[in-house]
Amino acid sequence: MECPLCKSAKTQKNGTSVRKGIRAQLYVCVTCGHQWRDYDRKATNYRRIIFIQDTHCGHHTGLTPPEFDNINMPYADFRKEAWTWFNNVIELMKPFDYCVYNGDLPDGKQIKNGGLELITGDRFQQIKMAVAIHNKINPVKSIVIRGTPYHTGKEENFEDDFADRIGAKVYNRFLGDMGGKIFDIRHKIGRSSIPHG
């Protein structure tokens, strides 16, 4: 098995572990020392689902893969720290059977404030950032829920472009089966005057 971090073929088995009743094979990379686990998806009906939303790629404080970052822009330290945390959690929790991208992946043009809080206002570049996030997660299957038109585009929807690039279906609202469970997912819900609403 290839190391997911350094891509070295020099890896070896390093015992097993049991998590929620599912046995996983542990591996270690001889080259870089990275450790990870892999469970047999066919041996269980257990599925790992991750929800990602409001990454606001392109914003000063949006989730930004290092290859797209501009260290001369404000909040560079914050973006680096956020990416490091995200990367570490994804590596710890892999592999994922499903990923739900629940809206507002790009930040858009920020028409109301003239783009003052953007690393880039190019929405195609923002979608490339979101694709890089998807490639880091590397799920078996993905679905995309449309977000707020202010961010994703009013005349066109850039999350549709994102869904095309990763081979996923896109929904305004998803109501259906995922991993043997029924989910009702949408980015935005209506407001209510009642206290618990």
Image: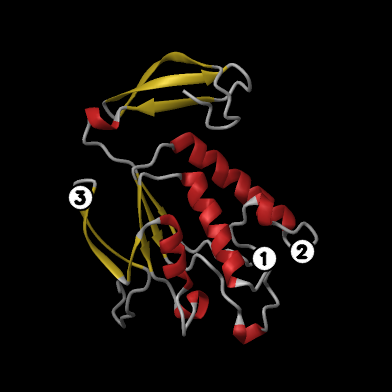
Question: What element does badge 2 sit on?
Answer: loop
Q: Where is residue 116 in the image (x, y as percent from the top left)?
A: 70, 77
Give the spatial CA distance, label 3 vs label 1: 36 Å
Nearer-N-terminus badge (1/2): 1
- Residue type at mark 2 is Met
Badge 1 vs badge 2, beta-carbon distance below 8 Å = yes
Where, by quadrant of the figure, is residue 38 drawn? top left
Tell me the quadrant of the picture where the C terminus can be found: bottom left
Q: Is residue 62 left or right of residue 38?
A: right
User: In the drawing, what numbered circle is on residue 60?
Assistant: 1
Residue beneath the point at 80% across and 61% down: 72
Q: Where is residue 153 in the image (x, y as percent from the top left)?
A: 49, 79
**With respect to residue 17, does 106 lie above or below?**
below
Q: Is residue 96 left or right of residue 90?
A: left
How crowded pointer 1 is (Cα within 10 Å; few <14, some 14-19, many 20+) is rated as many
Nearer-N-terminus badge (3/1): 1
Nearer-N-terminus badge (2/3): 2
Question: What element does badge 1 sit on?
Answer: loop
Question: What element does badge 3 sit on?
Answer: strand
Foreground of the two, 179 or 10: 10
Residue beneath the point at 22% across and 31% down: 44
Q: Where is residue 184 in the image (x, y as percent from the top left)?
A: 25, 63
- Residue type at mark 3 is Lys
Q: Identify residue for label 3.
A: 181
- Residue type at mark 1 is His
**With respect to residue 73, does 78 lie above or below?**
above
Q: Identify residue for label 2.
A: 73
Q: Where is residue 182 in the image (x, y as percent from the top left)?
A: 19, 55
How crowded pointer 2 is (Cα within 10 Å; few <14, some 14-19, many 20+) is rated as few
